[in-house]
């Protein structure tokens, strides 16, 4: 009986994951995800489940974490990343093309 229950549980988890995946593929428009404390974690635009447009991210305390833009799921243009104190992270911030940093900001 324990084996049958475990098998049923694993099947239900698999079905749930598949349903969630299908839901993501059809997602278009703006979406805001939240930290467990209720504060905003990410606000991003999606086209058919892929990030496409402006993306804003915050640390759990509400300070900015990242801001930039996606095109077909890849970082493009100016991206700014911030540490938890709100200070810009120059090592990660910069101009991106197809998800790769190609230069520093303002270079």
Image (cartoon, grey):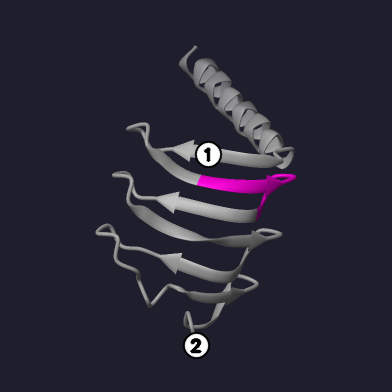
Occupied quadrant, residue 64: bottom left
* In the image: residue 24, left or right of residue 80: right
Q: Secondary structure at mark 2?
A: loop
Residue 72 position, x and y percent, is 71, 59
Return the residue found at the far left. 85
Residue 53 position, x and y percent, is 65, 55
Q: Secondary structure at mark 1?
A: strand
Q: Decide: is 2 above or below 11.
A: above
**Label 2 sits on residue:** 107
Which callout, 1 or 2, points at the residue further toward the start of the chain? 1
* In the image: residue 93, left or right of residue 25: left
Query: Is 18 in the magenta?
Result: no
Residue drawn at (41%, 65%), measured in percent from left and top?
81
* In the image: residue 73, left or right of residue 81: right
Total number of numbered labels?
Answer: 2
| Most common secondary structure along the magenta stretch | strand
Residue 80 position, x and y percent, is 45, 67
Q: Decide: is 26 above or below 84.
A: above
The CA distance from mark 1 to mark 2 is 32 Å
Residue drawn at (42%, 40%), measured in percent from left and top?
40
Question: Closer to the camera: disc 1 or disc 2?
Answer: 2
For mark 1, does the 10 Å Cα neighbourhood hold few (<14), some (14 to 19), or many (20 or more) residues? Answer: few
Query: Is 48 in the magenta?
Result: yes
Please name whichever residue, 69 or 9, is drawn nearer the observer in this view of the structure: 69
The answer to whether mark 1 and mark 2 are in CB contact below 8 A is: no
Tag shown at residue 70 = none
Return the residue found at the far front. 106
**Label 1 sits on residue:** 32
Q: Which residues are magenta?
A: 43-52
Please name whichever residue, 77 or 25, is drawn nearer the observer in this view of the structure: 77
Q: Decide: is 2 above or below 60.
A: above
For mark 2, does the 10 Å Cα neighbourhood hold few (<14), some (14 to 19), or many (20 or more) residues? Answer: few
């Amino acid at each position: 009986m324990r084996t049958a229950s475990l098998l049923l549980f694993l099947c239900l988890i698999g079905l749930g994951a598949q349903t969630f995946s299908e839901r993501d593929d059809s997602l278009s428009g703006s979406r805001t995800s939240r930290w467990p404390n209720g504060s905003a974690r990410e606000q991003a635009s999606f086209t058919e489940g892929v990030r496409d447009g402006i993306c804003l991210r915050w640390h759990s305390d509400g300070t900015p974490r990242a801001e930039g833009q996606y095109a077909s799921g890849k970082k493009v243009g100016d991206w700014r990343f911030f540490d938890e104190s709100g200070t810009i992270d120059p090592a990660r911030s910069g101009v991106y093309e197809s998800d790769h940093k190609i230069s520093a900001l303002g270079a």
